[in-house]
């Protein structure tokens, strides 16, 4: 079986029909709304099914001039913020600050501890996904690292923008853990997309931003769908209307998810180290009047 398959076609039939052998959807959710933001995945629920993908937020936020979340810490995970329209202001305790515009990416590999802040940039509403990835044991207490990627740096292959990992001839410039793919896919009405996960990618899911998709069942706008784990066969979807969605596949995270308030680690000892570093940085920020 080939690693990745890039097939987009617009069939003539009016009703979508997909092969019975394609990997099937086994779980769907609309998540929980918190104002303008919907939490589709948390580590205590869907994140256990699809780890290393442990949080996913989707939202459309009107500019208010205030920070989106306020300065806050993380450890043990990496966050990837992808503005689909509008832009994001960012600042973090690695010393970086700036703006990620539409189509760009903000990658924050928290490691043993980092604090960051962000808000809506400019006057246009911000529509975005924010993903949290649980880090491998070798990286969960490493030094933090941030990358801010312009739209021009995000490589594409057909309808796929590669946010993490690789697809066909496109690669992400982000230094993410191996064994993780994460894409933004846009299809015209009735177009099909077929994906054969790389060897070992036994978890896969998608979340619909705009439009709807037909796979083993219809997936409407605002819904996250999880595919059967470890099954053979491609994943195939067909757009119902012009559609935009994010898609992830990965080798399943082999460790338990040990949770702090802002942290996800593989053990209680690793969590304690992360929380100690978060507190050390927090003391410095409090002394400077930041928190």
Image: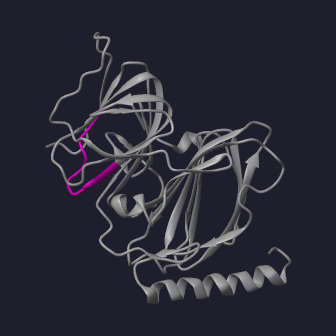
- Name the one closer to the observer, 75 or 228: 228
Q: Position of residue 224 (x, y in %)?
A: 43, 44
Q: Position of residue 188 (x, y in %)?
A: 43, 21
* The stretch drawn in magenta includes residue 68: no
The answer to which quarter of the image holds residue 169 is top left
Residue in the picture at 58% in, 78% down: 113
1 left or right of 54? left
What stretch of residues is rendered in magenta? 194-204
In the image, is residue 133 above or below residue 196?
below
Q: Give residue 265's position: percent from left, percent from top.
A: 45, 77
Q: Does the magenta stretch mainly form a helix, a strand or a loop?
A: loop
Looking at the image, which is closer to me, 45 or 203?
A: 45
- The residue closer to the viewer here, 150 or 28, is 28
- Counting every numbered tag in the picture gives 0
What residue sits 39% from the left and 30% below the top? 213
**Residue drawn at 76 percent across, 46 percent down:** 121
């Amino acid at each position: 079986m080939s690693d990745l398959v890039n097939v987009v076609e617009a069939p003539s039939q009016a009703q979508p029909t997909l092969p019975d052998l394609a990997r099937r959807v086994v779980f769907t959710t609309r998540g929980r709304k918190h104002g303008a933001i919907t939490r589709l995945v948390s580590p205590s629920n869907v994140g256990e099914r699809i780890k290393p993908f442990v949080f996913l937020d989707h939202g459309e936020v009107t500019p208010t001039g205030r920070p989106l979340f306020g300065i806050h810490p993380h450890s043990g995970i990496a966050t990837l913020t992808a503005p689909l329209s509008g832009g994001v202001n960012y600042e973090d305790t690695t010393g970086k600050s700036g703006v990620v515009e539409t189509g760009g990416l903000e990658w924050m590999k928290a490691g043993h501890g980092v604090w960051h802040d962000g808000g809506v940039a400019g006057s246009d509403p911000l529509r975005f996904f924010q993903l949290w990835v649980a880090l491998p044991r070798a990286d969960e207490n490493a030094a933090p690292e941030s990358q801010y990627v312009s739209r021009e740096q995000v490589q594409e292959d057909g309808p796929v923008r590669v946010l993490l990992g690789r697809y066909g001839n496109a690669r992400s410039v982000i230094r993410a853990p191996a064994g993780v793919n994460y894409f933004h896919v846009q299809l015209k009405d009735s177009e099909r997309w077929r994906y054969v996960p790389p060897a070992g990618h036994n978890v896969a899911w998608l979340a619909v931003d705009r439009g709807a998709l037909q796979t083993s069942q219809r997936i409407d706008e605002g819904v996250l769908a999880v595919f059967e784990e470890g099954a053979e066969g491609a994943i195939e979807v067909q757009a119902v209307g012009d559609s935009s969605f994010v898609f992830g596949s990965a080798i399943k995270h082999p460790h338990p998810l040990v949770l702090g308030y802002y942290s996800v680690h593989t053990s209680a000892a690793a969590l304690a180290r992360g929380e100690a570093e978060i507190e050390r940085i927090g003391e410095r920020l409090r002394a400077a009047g930041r928190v």
